[in-house]
Amino acid sequence: MVRLAMLVGALTILLSPAVMGAQQPSTEPARVWVAVGLGGGLFSSVDGAANDPGIALLAALVLKEDGHRVALRGSIVAEVLGDEVGDFGLLYGRAWTGERSEQSLSAGVSLVYGNDCHGVFGGPCDPSKTVGLPVSATMSFRPYGFLGLGLEAFANLNSLASFIGVSGMLELGALR
């Protein structure tokens, strides 16, 4: 609960008009793209153990218009032969676009699932579900109007198994 309060406080500061007013979002037409990513992350194990390292995978469908960014995103952090935790959520945020770059901050709501797996090859597994608070920060370089490369730092606070990660991203679509 303390972590959630700290996150809400940090997001309130980051998304406040005083901070956000330093850069005004540009006025531009609506853009839609898909993004996929691979990286690493940590999660508090479903069985309550210490933070477990894992492989992070992300996929998102993103809509951006006039600096408003909406993403339908799925993410997962999983041990190679063990537990996993992931989410599927809707995130809203603000984005700032340069000539060949974009940065954004987003938060939202998600359905979180986790599998507490037993045995050498991860089975059998005990599945669990809850609601979570996903947050995301992205930076991308867009050398062409249809192709982007970037990084996404993400987290999800929830009662099941909170997780964080960083992923390299490939973006394809109407980027600029």
Image (spheres, helix red, strand yellow):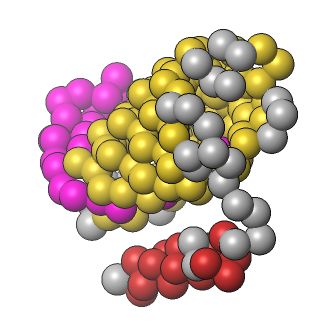
Magenta-drawn stretch, dominant element (helix, strand or loop): strand
In x, y percent, where is residue 76? 42, 36
Q: Is residue 12 above or below residue 138?
A: below
Residue 52 shows in the view: no
Q: Nearer the viewer, residue 122 or 66?
A: 66
> Residue 44's quadrant in the figure?
bottom left
In the image, residue 167 lies in the stretch drawn in magenta: no
Magenta residue span: 112-139
Q: Quadrant of residue 122?
A: top left
Asked if residue 149 can be seen in this view, the reply is yes
Q: For this view, does 79 lie left or right of residue 140?
A: left
Residue 118 is inside the magenta segment: yes
Give the residue displayed 16% in from the left and 41% down from the top.
127
Side (left or right) of 58 relative to 127: right
| Residue at 40% across, 50% down | 91
Question: Front-most of 142 and 77?
Answer: 142
Quarter of the image with the C terminus in it = top right
Q: At x 34% / y 83%, what residue is drawn?
A: 1
Left or right placement of residue 80 versus residue 123 in this view: right
In the displayed structure, would residue 135 be above or below residue 146?
below
Measuring from the top left, give residue 150's x and y in whole percent: 72, 32
Residue 41 screen position, x and y as percent: 57, 45
Judge whether 104 appears above or below 167 on screen.
below
**Pick the front one: 122 or 46:** 46
Residue 75 image point, x, y percent: 42, 37
